[in-house]
Image (cartoon, grey):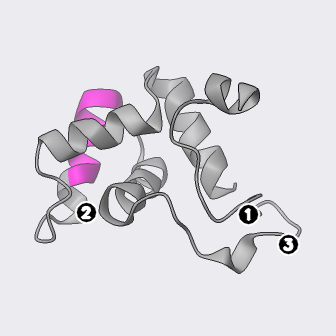
Amino acid sequence: MSFQAYLDAIEDKTGKTPRTLVDQARERGYDAADVKAAVIVGWLKEEYGLGRGHAMALVHVIKNGPKISAKHVGTTGSHRDDTDTLWLDGKAARASA
């Protein structure tokens, strides 16, 4: 599953765009350097029922922003992403962008 596919699945499961969840995390102070991933994973599980894999994809975005390694960009396979910048504003908005 690509990184973007994880974020799209999070939107499907929660009804919230990744950007909305990132904003909520920032409001809670979860983007601070000393906040451990487990705290964020626990919040996402409790509030939204997300599993560890999906939550960790969001942890990356909360802590590092939407840029990802270009390692899988332009390659083949299930982990390939189209770009090194993740779309956070929802699948419907990406389709019209």
Q: Residue at x 16, y 70 (%)?
A: 33
Q: Amino acid at mark 1?
A: His
Q: Residue at x 41, y 38 (%)?
A: 19
Was residue 41 drawn as part of the magenta stretch in this picture?
A: yes
Q: Which residue is mark 3?
A: 75
Residue 83, by quadrant, is: bottom right
Residue 76 position, x and y percent, is 89, 68
In the image, taking residue 8 as reference, residue 89 lies left or right, namely left
| Residue range (magenta) | 40-49
Q: Which residue is mark 1?
A: 79
Furthest-bottom residue in this view: 71
Numbered disc 2: secondary structure: helix
* Cα–Cα span, label 1 and label 3: 9 Å
User: In the image, is residue 19 above or below residue 93?
Assistant: below
Numbered disc 3: secondary structure: loop
In the image, taking residue 58 as reference, residue 36 lies left or right, namely left
Residue 35 position, x and y percent, is 13, 64
Q: Residue at x 25, y 63 (%)?
A: 37
Q: Earlier in the sequence, mark 2 or mark 1?
A: 2
Was residue 63 drawn as part of the magenta stretch in this picture?
A: no
Number of residues whose C-alpha sits closer than 10 Å to that of mark 3, classed few (under 14), some (14–19) or many (20 or more): few
Q: Amino acid at mark 3?
A: Thr
User: In the image, is residue 6 above or below residue 33?
Assistant: above
| Closer to us: 41 or 80 | 80
Q: Which residue is mark 2?
A: 37
Q: Please identify, in this view, whether the residue under mark 1 or under mark 3 is nearer the observer.
A: 3
Q: Amino acid at mark 2?
A: Ala
